[in-house]
Amino acid sequence: MTAPQTASTAPPPVNMVGHAHLSGVFAPQRTEVDVDELTVVGELPADLNGTYFRNGPNPRFDPIGRYVYPLDGDGMVHRLRIDNGRAGYSNRFVRTPMVLAEEKAGRALWGGITDTYSPGPDLVGPELAGSSRQLPDINVVAHGGRLLAMAESDLPYRLDPADLATLGRTDCDGAMALGSTAHPKIDPATGELVLFTYRLQAPFLAWSVLGPDGSTRRAPTAIEGVDEPVMVHDMALTARYIVLFLCPLVFDIPGMLRGASLLDWRPARGTRIALIPRDGAAVRWAETDAFWVWHFANAYDEADGTVVVDYVQWAYPGGLADVDTPQRGGLVRAVLDPRTGDVDRTELAMRPVEFPRIDDRDLTAPHTTIATAGISGTDRTRDALMFLDPRRGTEIWWKAGPFAVGEPVFMPGEQHAYWGTLGTDLRDMTSWFHILAAQDPAAGPVASIRMPIRVPAGLHGSWLPSDSDLLDPGAR
Ligand SMILES: [Fe+2]
């Protein structure tokens, strides 16, 4: 997603002092390191071998203009290897042409996503003049032999898993020619990667599919019934459907050019839900009240034809700039009937949680646990992981004490399973990767790996077992 650029004067620097998403645990990290042997408190599980990749906004230089979390920034990918009781770490910026041009200049040249400024040819040459900053800073996904730093409905960047070098922007042989959500879903049953993208011009929504080998199985296909640009961050996937929630957050380009927000919240419209059959049949629609969704936990088909979707629901806080106002909402289940358009919503756990994840091997099938990062105290720091069993409604909390923690990731070991998360100790700003036993996460970490540098609070990541094709190409 790129907004139009019209202004010609560079905006002033962002005041980073005390900025909610540019200071403290969010302060950008500019150091890149490779460290083979990390300090571990506790004992790394002998049956856990693999690599965790995580992405997040991390501006290469102090930004100019406006800084809108979580969309602005540059990508920095962190890689944590766990191998036979040892752990190593590397991190690299995702080097887009904008990052490279700024490194040459030694300062920020582009404004933020909601600024109308882009540098001219005198600053960045004719090829980049007038371009928008590319932001592959939201997620990092491995599929079909590719490691991809994912952007918000834009083309991803391919990375070399061996050294995290940026290999270049890619449309994945055309499958992502219109862009991709940062949250494509990999169907464990078929090995397919299914994605959608939203756009400022028609087609406003499209979907496509890559086969397990990374080839294009369905080229970008317009989703009918959408006649204006709408922001949709994540998707859910079942064996039969792609599920998109079209919350009433509409792009208002005339408004932005007048100086208002690029995004306009229009709650009277309610939320439209698209059920897009993966077999290419006509899209089914359902409608319900207005609310906002960043992230889905999972979805699956019931035998009676209904579709279960678990997600984190927000009462929209009034603007992207206010995205971290105290959260009203929580984990919600919607049961959708594709035949009637009925939507039946049930509150699973109305807690201030985000970043819902499950055991990725259960995607598109019923899941037993939804893990989230949550707030246990009164301030806004995510300082706990909450594990919900949606069948029983039981919650297990691990309160992380002084740590601000991020998205949990499920890590299957050879005998046992684990959850991991990156956290930063607010007392000394050291960062750690905590490993919890999936059988008893409330007991706290079985091991905590000390990161050699502070890892800023970020967004999304992936765990790859050590025998994955990407990490062990010889196994292909
Ligand atoms: Fe996200």
Image (spheres, grey):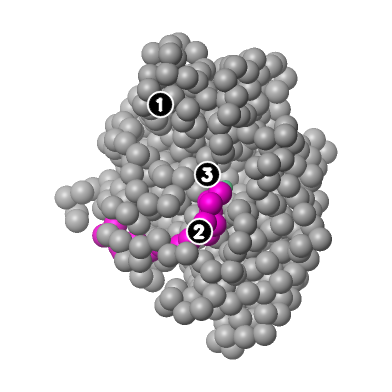
User: Which of disc 3 and disc 2 is earlier in sequence?
Assistant: 3
> Label 3 vs label 1: CA separation?
17 Å
> Could you tell whether 22 is left or right of 475 in the image?
right
Q: Which of the two residues, 457 or 171, is positioned nearer the viewer here?
A: 171
Residue at 76 percent of width and 64 percent of height: 270
Q: Which mark is residue 128?
A: 1
Per the model, the C-alpha gap separating discs 2 and 3 is 13 Å
466 relative position to 13: left or right: left
Q: Secondary structure at mark 2?
A: loop
The range drawn in magenta is 198-214
What amino acid does circle 2 point to? Pro
Is the residue indicated by label 2 positioned so its CB lies within 8 Å of ligand 1? no
Q: Quadrant of residue 429?
A: top right
Residue 430: image x %, image y %? 57, 24
Towards the viewer: 382 or 154: 154
Q: Quadrant of residue 387?
A: bottom right
Quadrant of the image containing the C terminus: bottom left
Q: Is residue 194 visible?
A: no
- The residue wearing badge 3 is 1
Q: Which residue is mark 2?
A: 203
Whether the residues at callouts 2 and 3 have beta carbons within 8 Å, the answer is no
Residue 133: percent from left, percent from top: 49, 31
Check residue 209 for magenta coloring.
yes
- Magenta stretch: includes residue 154: no
